[in-house]
Image: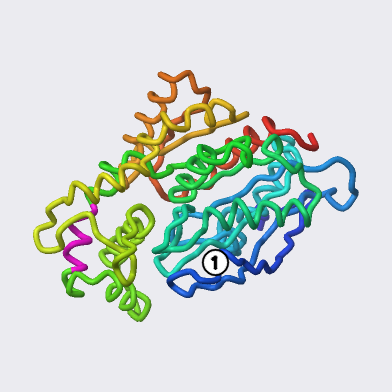
């Protein structure tokens, strides 16, 4: 019979797996590990030396972490295999790609600092970025450094690009959380129902989630909303630092608490960070027009707001949902790397 699975007939890079001990995560409220694996992809030819490489940073989506992007796949490619192919095809210049682990007991990360989650924004910017610059032959500066991600990782990429223009020179945002009123409000009813089963106690829900043999979609939705509350509106006076933006019994919205969430919505943040976005060498934004979390609506608005402010960006709405969209990296990674300084 003919061979149906295409063989890999091109040079392969290598993945270094390092351990990093964080000081800023040491006292995180969930006692999540402060020593974590940091995976770094090195392209073919890296060992030959020479000019430094551009570095792209991969922020994983909610429920995942950087090392998970290297898992074996029965169909398709993991991230390292995709990078090998793109470099071989010539669309992507040789780049270093960094995959941090920012997973938490709340199921993921928004890559912001919060006393209810941990200082993960500081962890990336002040600990991991300098660590990678010291350990590897990469451009040390925003001109040679980009950040990308999907969903929560896309949100993190956009917010980091807004807040840290001295660190990031390019960003790719794939279905990043945007338009919170359309993304999160529709989930509050389900979250309230599930939380009511635990007496309205977010901590009881989190503990039960980790002990349940097979948590379902309703529990996942509630956990996600708790994680967002912990990220966007931490309460220093509460033992777990978490307060909800709605009443668990009536699901009535708490306008003050909800306003705190909206301050973290990229649509709200644009004006304060417009200059940082204008300074990017590349800003790639895309979303599926059938995204099941309604992210396409806020993303359309985001692109329109960027255009109003003359902020250069690439926006594309593709035929797809929120799931199985890794193929979009074939477009965004070459675009970002081509805009950055580094070995071309």
Instruction: Return the residue nearer the eye: 144 or 289.
Output: 144
Does 226 sit left or right of 52 as displayed? left
Q: Is residue 287 left or right of residue 193?
A: right
In the image, 113 versus 298, the foreground residue is 113
Q: Position of residue 96 (x, y in %)?
A: 72, 48
Which of the 4 image quarters holds residue 17? bottom right
* Direction left: furthest residue: 250
Figure check: 262 above or below 62: above
What residue does disc 1 label? Answer: 25
Magenta stretch: give its range. 187-195
Q: Is residue 293 above or below residue 277?
A: below
Could you tell me if residue 228 is visible in this image?
yes
**Does any portion of residue 4 appear in the rendered image?**
no
Q: Is residue 184 above or below residue 195?
A: above
Residue at the image point whose x is 56% and y is 57% from the top: 75
Task: Name the quadrant containing residue 280.
Answer: top right
């Amino acid at each position: 019979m003919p061979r149906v699975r295409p063989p890999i007939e091109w040079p392969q890079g290598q993945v270094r797996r390092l351990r990093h001990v964080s000081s800023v995560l040491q006292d995180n409220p969930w006692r999540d590990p402060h020593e974590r694996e940091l995976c770094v992809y090195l392209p073919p030819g890296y060992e030959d030396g020479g000019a430094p490489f551009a570095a792209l940073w991969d922020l994983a989506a909610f429920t995942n972490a950087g090392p998970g992007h290297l898992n074996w796949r029965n169909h398709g490619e993991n991230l390292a295999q995709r990078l090998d192919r793109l470099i071989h095809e010539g669309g992507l210049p040789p780049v270093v790609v960094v995959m941090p682990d920012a997973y938490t007991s709340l199921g993921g990360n928004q890559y912001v600092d919060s006393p209810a989650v941990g200082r993960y924004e500081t962890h990336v910017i002040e600990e991991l970025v300098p660590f990678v610059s010291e350990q590897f032959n990469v451009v040390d500066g925003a001109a040679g450094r980009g950040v990308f991600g999907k969903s929560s990782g896309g949100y993190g990429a956009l917010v980091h690009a807004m807040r840290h223009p001295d660190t990031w020179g390019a960003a790719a945002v794939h279905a990043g959380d945007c338009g919170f009123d359309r993304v999160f409000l529709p989930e509050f009813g389900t979250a309230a129902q599930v939380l009511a089963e635990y007496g309205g106690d977010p901590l009881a829900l989190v503990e039960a989630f980790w002990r349940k043999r097979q948590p379902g979609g309703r529990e996942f939705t509630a956990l996600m909303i708790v994680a967002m509350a912990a990220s966007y509106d931490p309460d220093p006076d509460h033992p777990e630092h978490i307060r909800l933006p709605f009443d668990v019994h009536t699901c009535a919205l708490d306008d003050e608490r909800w306003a705190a969430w909206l301050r973290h919505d990229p649509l709200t943040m644009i004006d304060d960070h417009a200059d940082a976005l204008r300074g990017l060498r590349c800003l790639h934004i895309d979303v599926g027009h059938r995204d099941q979390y309604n992210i396409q609506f806020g993303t359309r608005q985001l692109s329109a707001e960027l255009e109003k402010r003359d902020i250069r960006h690439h926006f594309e709405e593709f035929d797809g949902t929120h799931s199985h969209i890794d193929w979009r990296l074939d477009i965004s990674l070459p675009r970002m790397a081509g805009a950055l300084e580094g070995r071309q």
